[in-house]
Amino acid sequence: MPTRSIGQEYIKGLWSENPVFRQLLGLCPTLAVTGWVINGLAMGLATSFVLIFSSLVVSLIKKLIPSQVRIASYIVIIATFVTVADRFLAAYFPDISKDLGPYVPLIVVNCIILGRQEAFSSKNSVGRSLIDALGMSSGFVLALLVLSSIREILGSGTYLGHQVMGSWFKPWIIMILPAGAFLALGILLGIALQIEKKTKSRV
Amino acid sequence: MELIAIFISAILVNNFVLYYFLGICPFLGVSKRIDSAISMGLAVTFVMTITAVVSWAINNWILIPHGLDYLKIVSFILVIASLVQLVEMFIRKVSPPLYQALGIYLPLITTNCAIMGLALLAALREYGFAEAVVFGVGSGLGFTLAIVLMAGIREQLDLADVPEPLKGAGISLIVAGIMALAFMGFIGMIK
């Protein structure tokens, strides 16, 4: 593995290895909760919490986990933090928790989290794992923010619940429906790929 | 009547892939050819049915009577992971041809959020036993329907002239969006 500086370790999650746009991981929550910016943000932060703490614990005890049962161990660690996040949201933000419904518990099967444990935390030091988890989380939150901003502004003419489009604007209802999620993400992926190609050909 | 409504709504109206966005990974990953899509769909339906039964039993016989509701996430995911393992060993022993056909798709199902979503949704809606089973079978068939349709479209798409950056995941998602739009036509069917 090429040695990266701490900064590169963090930055890679934002773009070159962005979990959503580049690796196509964690698409289920990305599509499901991005009808409103506030839901996307809550989902992003909850997932970040789980990812960061799971990476911390896994990298701390990586020497104690026998490799045959590592996946099961990771899942139990992840599920523990998901339960914490789920209870926390239900206690302090009951409205958001209700909106997100089963998608909070479903963080446990988010492939980004298990993927990072398997690919990174189980092989790297605690510090690096934390930086990596922070980078990936930022990348995920960024992707959710971009998608939910587009969907909320076009789909209901509001941002975080505040009216931003003039009265002339007729909301595109489709954007807050499931179909709009697929269309918007598909087009965003295309744009991301195009940008990637442009920047590569320039180098 | 209630059961029929749950069944139809799980297949068409609230399709797991196109309405709940569950199981997107295999939906995009294993939908390049119709035959593998059918295998994947059947494997998922099979595991979903068993999951519906087992998770219902655990939720209603162990978790709720003992006030252990907060252990739902941990216990469901462990049950699903071990269940998939068990089903895999069982099929390998009993029917090698079926095992060959399902191949790598069985282990992949563990990380399929549709299975976990099924267990959670059934628990959330407080389904009875019969309802949970019907919901499991229906959701599995709905997933099969979506992934097979998708594979059919993608086989045709290979011949189409798709803009370079949209090739692969981009165009698949757009196609899924149009499919979701078409499936919205079923919404009026239930209530």
Image (tube, rainbow, N blue to C red):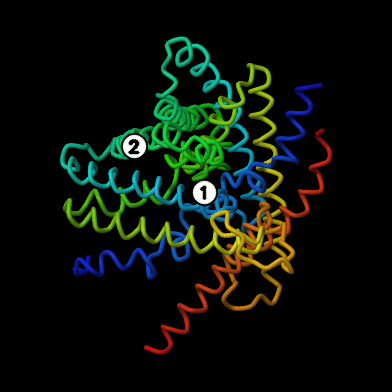
Percent across and percent down for residue B47 are: 56, 32
In terms of image quadrants, where is residue B115?
Answer: top right
Neighbours of disc 1 within 10 Å: few (<14), some (14-19), many (20+): many
Percent across and percent down for residue A51 are: 33, 47
The earlier-in-sequence mark between 1 and 2 is 1
- In which chain is the residue bearing label 2? A
| Mark 2 lies on residue | A81
Q: In the visual, does A114 lie left or right of A180?
A: left
Instruction: Residue at 17% x, 43% y: name it.
Output: A60
Residue furthest out toward the bottom = A202
Closer to the observer: label 1 or label 2?
A: 1
Neighbours of disc 2 within 10 Å: few (<14), some (14-19), many (20+): many
Q: In the visual, does B127 lie left or right of A168?
A: left
Local secondary structure at mark 2: helix
Local secondary structure at mark 1: helix
Tell me which amino acid carries mark 1. Answer: Asn
Q: Which mark is residue A39?
A: 1
Rendered-image quadrant of the C terminus of chain B: top right
Rendered-image quadrant of the N terminus of chain B: top right
Q: Is residue A19 above or below residue B18?
A: below
Tell me which amino acid carries mark 2. Answer: Phe
Percent across and percent down for residue B139 are: 66, 35
Instruction: Residue at 34% x, 46% y: name it.
Output: A49
Residue nearest the viewer, comparing A35 with B45: A35
